[in-house]
Each structure stands twice: as C-alpha cells, then as structure tokens.
Amino acid sequence: MRVVIDTNAWVSRLLLSSSTSARAVDRALDDHEVVVSDALIEELADVLSREKFDRYISLADREEFLRRVLRIARTIPVLSIVEDRRDPDDNRLLALALDSESEVVLTGDRDLLSLHPWRGIALVPPHEFLAAYG
C-alpha cells in the first residue's frame, strides 16, 4: 500500500520519537511504500530549517533526517493540479496522493482530515493509521 506522510507527521517523528505520530510514521516506513514529491521535500526542508527548532535538535541532525527521508521514500513526479483547499501546500499533498495512487494520507492537519475520504483516498490521523493499517 502506498502512503503519503504529511510534513507535520514527519516533523513529529523527528522531534517526538516516542509519540503516536512517530510510531505511525515508523509503521508506514516498515510496512508500506511511502511516497514523496519534490514539493513535499521542499516544504519539509523549509520547515526543518526554521530557527525555532534549534533548541530541540541541531540543524545538522535535521538535515540528516531529510537525507534519510529521501533515501527511504520513493519520489513521485506530480502532474496533477488540485485546488480543493485554501492552503497550496495541502493542494500539493493531495496532488501527490492522487498521482501516486496512494491509498492513505497520514496527517495531523485538521483541514485535511475534514476531507476524509477524498477521491477514494483515506486521510487519517496517526492513531487511526496505527489502528487500521499498523
């Protein structure tokens, strides 16, 4: 099964390694095919470069985490344009889910979760991902 992991879940995985989000991300990586796009990687890189994270984890460790994501996840080209949400990052994430033919989007974003299901794709928070797919 293909899974898209939203930026908020990736960040939670990095910063809170024993959280439900971290367990869900780890389960997705262990048991499923995780996909990313160039846009998702750019968003994640932007978020991880923010100074507010300096007090929790070094920039070098954040950069290494991003490199690991790139090694582990499959990068998918995204051609679809989705305009269902106000947030362009959410639209790009949905386009990735659509073009990669993913079955699940793992996210903590309430706006995205309110769409569940979206075009046959499950949009689920970490605890539901673990219950249903873990």
Image (spheres, rainbow, N blue to C red):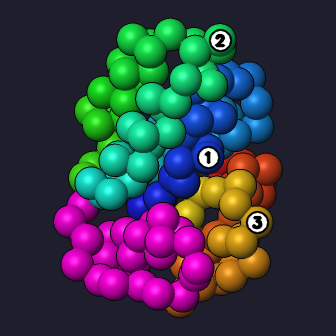
Q: Is residue 97 visible?
A: no
Q: Residues within 10 Å of mark 1 (few under 14, many from 20)?
A: some
Query: What stretch of residues is rendered in magenta?
Result: 76-100
Tell me the element at label 3: helix
Tag 2–tag 3 contact (CB < 8 Å): no
The quadrant where residue 45 appears: top left
From the viewer's perspective, is residue 109 above or below residue 78? Answer: above
Left/right of residue 122 with respect to residue 96 in the rendered view: right
Residue at x 31% of width, y 76% of height: 99
Identified by mark 3, the residue type is: Arg
Q: CA distance from mark 1 to mark 2?
A: 18 Å
Asked if the magenta segment contains residue 78, the reply would be yes
Q: Which residue is mark 1?
A: 8
Q: Which secondary structure lies at badge 2? A: loop
Q: Confirm or deny contact between disc 1 and disc 2 (CB under 8 A).
A: no
Instruction: Report if residue 110 lies within the magenta region.
Output: no
Badge 2 is on which residue? 55
